[in-house]
Amino acid sequence: SSADISITLRNQGRDAFKPEAYGSSIIVNQHINLDGSRSYRLKSKSGTLISSKKEELIGILDHFNIQVDNPVSVLTQEMSKHFLQSKNEGDKYKFFMKATQLEQMKEDYSSIMKTKQNTCTQIEQGVERLQELKRLYCERKERYKSIGFVNDMRNHLEDLKHKMAWAVVGEMEKEIQPIKEGIRAEEGNTDKFVQKLEECQVKVNEAEEKYKAIQERLITVSEEAQALHPQCISLKADVQARRKAVNEAEALYNRLKTELKRLGKDDEQLRKRIEELKSSANQVSEPEKLERQRKITHLREQLKAFHDEEIMIGQQVDQFQQAIYKCKEEHARLRREDCDVKQALDAKQKQLRELKDSKTNTLKRFGPHVPAFLEAVERAYRQGQFKHKPIGPLGAFIHPKDAELTLAVESCLKSLVQAFCCDNHSDERALQLLMSKYYPHGFRPQIIVNKFQNKVYDVRHRGVHHPEFPSVLTALEIDDAVVANCLIDVRGIETVLLIKNSRKAREVMQFNRPPKNCREAFTAEGDQVFERRYYSSDYLRPKFLSKDVEAEISHLEKEIENKKAQLTASQQHLCSIENEIRQNEDHLHGHRRHQKELQIKIRTTNAEIADLENMEEHQSVDICTLEDEAQENKGKMESVKKEMQQQSRKLEELKNTLQVAEKNFEEMKEKIHQVEEIAGPIKDELNQADSEVENSKRRLQHYEEKQKEHLACIKRHKELLTAKEKELEEKIAQARQIYSERIEVSRTVKSLDAEMNRLRERINSENDRHGNREEIVQQFHDAKERYEDANSKVKNLKKFIRLLEEIMTQRFKIYRQFLRLLSLRCKLYFDYLLRIRACSGKILFDHKNETLSITVQPREEDRAALNDVRSLSGGERSFSTVCFILSLWSITESPFRCLDEFDVYMDMVNRRIAMDMILKVADSQRHRQFILLTPQSMSSLPTSSRIRILRMQDPERGQRTLNFRNRNDKEEDQ
């Protein structure tokens, strides 16, 4: 029902474990019950029970480095077989790590790092607790100090009153000084305003001259474009006529070519017939001759009908070719229109996606990347990259009061809706750099540099005022004064009227003199109206400023549906044209086949006629007639050849003239395109020049108003200075009454007043408080002691963590080095042991992936083909096992080495070599005990006092139980 195991360990030398208690040996008794439970009893050499605790046994094992679960110390045959035949190289690597105790080191390091992390968490908690203790300590300290400082605070309050009186005087003097400097600076800037006015007048004159010159250029270019259009139409008609002539000439040439081939075949048949007649001697009767003549006449009538049908088919082929050419031209035109519609559809769909996105974020109406870009601007501003945060897009800050004028406002502002405004050029450069990361090349919005002001310009004297129609400025609700000032400076929105009806706009701007200060107007459809010009808008719907997003989305969806319907209709038309082309081509191919069939019938009929004529009597045949016919046929062939040559030259000439006409037509189209391209920039230049004229006039008016404001400002400042100086004299008189001598004070009145209020409150609180002085002192000392103790602990823990990090870094470095060295020693020793038997092999370590692979080659001569140990024979595998175990023995420390049936599969040679190797290793390590279990005979071992052989008796055959003695009986015998 139970079992007992007893092991005696030598306990001698300087490394003995508690020799005073155990003596020279330690006896370990283990009792195992039937249910699997175990108990230990540790006795001294004399048999005295020292301990029955497992912790004591573990201490003994650690002291003597006895690794019970290390397979290298005790390796069974089953364990060796499982290890060497394992397919998982990671298991082999774990075996190596466990054998060398590196796995335990790795787990220890992980445990230390986890402890370090917990300590860091405790430090963080301690720092938070330390801040609380510090706050409490400061409160106690402040309360402690306040006990004896009431009188000092009263004296200090009186000093502050004296300083306060003269601080007011000092601040008043500081206020007066900038006013004086400002008056001097403003008086010095008067000449600059005069100079600016002169410069602005010069710029106005230059801008007007530039506008007139550009207007003349535009008129010239427009006249030139109008003059070229009739020539282009004429050249196009000429190209079409010449192309038709080329097609007709080409068809005639093909017919002549066909006729020439037919004449050639007729000539060949005539020659053959003449030869046959000359050699023929047959005679026929008169009735047969008449029948042949009748057949010949009938065949000649059929031949004539075939020729007429062939001519008609040729004309129809020409008609089909012309129809195919026209259909292909129409197809190409429709393809271009289809491509344009697809591009417009893609643009509308993109705009629809942006509008739908803007339902959740209105900034996305200005571009899908705008929200992210504005976040980047905000981050850059917080990081100090901008002196003033840039404002934009400007359209996000403006809102039309009347929804019907939204398109007019967008047409007026154009790209300014997406523009940004900066306070200075340094911010502009930083914003440009940031924009390059978010906006595609060539699509960066405009950046306007304008000094930021918190107040909107006063434009009452230079803005347009109409009793019926608003200006752009008055029609908008603008969230930011900087945006309003920017649009006033750049676009002059105070001078632009918004008139819903285009007829009314013409009446206001063109039929009568425009209102004062008004230079242009916009209609509800976005049309631009000047005093002498009217430009239609390119926009149909507002894109950025519309308030009713759902309506815009609905309108866009309808437009997309219309575009899709247009695209579908266009594609159906394309398909119908393609079907028409295919049908015409099928008809053309059918007619050509019919034409070829007719030509075959003509040749067949001619052959039949020739055959019938060849059947006439030899005597009546007029060979001369056939020869004359052959001669006539040759003449026809020559005539057709000449006509073909003439037609070929004519066709070549027609093609050349067609190429010239097409070239002239393309040149004319290119010329018209160039003129139109020239007119576009000139129109833009004209608008820009007109804007420059208006801007120059507005700038001149602006500086005139600025000069008036400047002179008025100087007058106001002088009046203010007089009042301030009078007030200063009164403040000095009051200060002398409080304290006669002047005191130089560096602090502000606000800070002095705040400190005086705090002192009064503290004095009042101290007077009202009736606390115990000893209790206050005790609380202060307790708080100070707790704070200093916690502070010391936190500092010591932080120092310990830093030291631990340094130690762990160094130890992990040594651990990696130790791992490499042990791996190298194991590989070298394994290779050395294999060479003893003229074998070769290697151990491959992959520390990164934690894998280990073993390869062995039994014969030294074939080292290139290394095999896995599973492919070896039983003896070779056992020998390899021994070599690998010996290699692990060379890098591990343990007082025991135990192998079970290590040579069971070896032949005599391998067993002898393995035994010699093990004995050699055992002889070199006499401080260790080697235990080898084998069923083989050990009679061949050398006789030595250090070798002890224990042979078990052979078991009795048929024995069914083991004759173990009872433990109690055994103890009685002892």
Image (tube, rainbow, N blue to C red):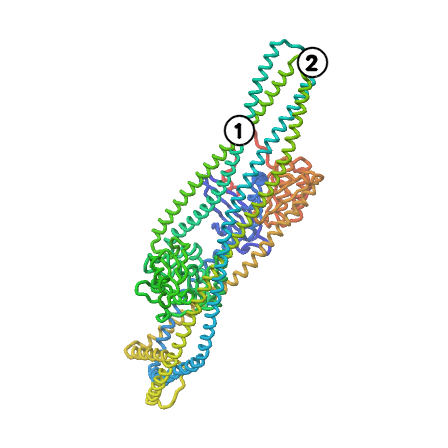
Tell me which amino acid carries mark 2.
Ser
Residue tagged 1? 312
Please state the horizontal and vertical placement of residue 729, each as a whole percent of the image. Answer: 35, 88
Question: In which quadrant of the rendered view does residue 534 lie?
Answer: bottom left
Cα separation, mark 2 vs mark 1, equals 40 Å
Please state the horizontal and vertical placement of residue 687, each as a whole percent of the image. Answer: 45, 61
Tell me which amino acid carries mark 1.
Met
Within 10 Å of disc 2 (Cα), the crowding (few <14, some 14-19, many 20+) is some
Question: In which quadrant of the rendered view does residue 19 lie?
Answer: bottom right
Viewer-side residue, 655 vs 155: 655
Which mark is drawn over residue 145?
Answer: none
Viewer-side residue, 64 vs 596: 596
Mark 2 or 1 closer to N-term?
Answer: 2
Residue tagged 2? 280
> Above or below — where is 265 with respect to 337?
above
Question: Is residue 178 in sight in this rendering?
Answer: yes
